[in-house]
Image (tube, rainbow, N blue to C red):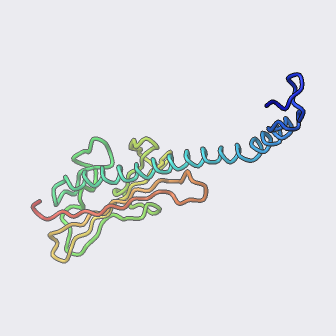
Amino acid sequence: MCDCVGGKSKRGAKAQAGFSILETMISAVILLVGVVPVMALFGIAAGQNKKQGDIATRTIEYSQDKMEQLLSLDFNDGSTNTAIFPASATGGTGLGGAMAASSTVGGSNPAAPVAGYVDYLDSNGNLLTSPTGAFYTRVWGISTDATGNIKTVQVVTAAVSSLAAGGPAPTMTLVGAKGFGH
């Protein structure tokens, strides 16, 4: 049975459920003022994390490259220049040459590099001849054990700066060993 007269409801317009245009507009303003700016921060944070991760990955890659280059040299090599590409047979420090037992050459502090044991790389990993324009500093040190038959090679690659505000610049340290006759 219909509770209507002439096709019109007796209850009127008040019986209809829904949102008024005013309620919809207030919701839209809250969304625009409160939620959308926070969503933009998520995008910025994701972009910064990606860039920082890329820099950290490159410090690993550049450390591995130098370690492989140094460990491929002869045990008593003291002249190969690995600070240029391709490496030159003369003009460098090689693997420290014939070293006495329990001795060390080079260094492991990118803030205080030792001449002959440092590379400077731009943001794309290209070797530079000086620290001017460098984004990465790569240093290495070589030490011998008490017998003089094992050389421990330590390579440290550090980014000059961090992309994350207030965060530390990514740094990677790799340690490898080379035995006499290997």
Residue at the (39%, 55%) spot, across then down: 138
List x then y, in percent, for residue 25. Answer: 82, 37
Query: In the rendered image of this protein, does residue 127 appear above or below residue 140?
Result: above
Query: In the rendered image of this protein, does residue 173 appear above or below residue 14?
Result: below
Query: In the rendered image of this protein, does residue 109 appear above or below residue 36?
Result: below
**In the orientation shown, which residue stands out farthest toward the bottom?**
146
**In the orientation shown, which residue stands out farthest toward the front?**
1
Is 116 in front, or is 40?
40
List x then y, in percent, for residue 9. Answer: 87, 30
- 178 lies left or right of 40: left
Residue at the (78%, 45%) spot, across then down: 30
List x then y, in percent, for residue 44. Answer: 61, 45
- Indicate the quadrant containing the C terminus: top left, top right, bottom left or bottom right: bottom left
Instruction: Examine the image and state in which quarter residue 127 appears.
Output: top left
- Indicate the quadrant containing the N terminus: top left, top right, bottom left or bottom right: top right
Instruction: Examine the image and state in which quarter residue 165 appears.
Output: bottom right
Is 151 in front, or is 14?
14
- 153 lies left or right of 149: right
List x then y, in percent, for residue 114. Answer: 38, 61
Residue at the (41%, 45%) spot, across then down: 129
**In the orientation shown, which residue stands out farthest toward the left?**
181
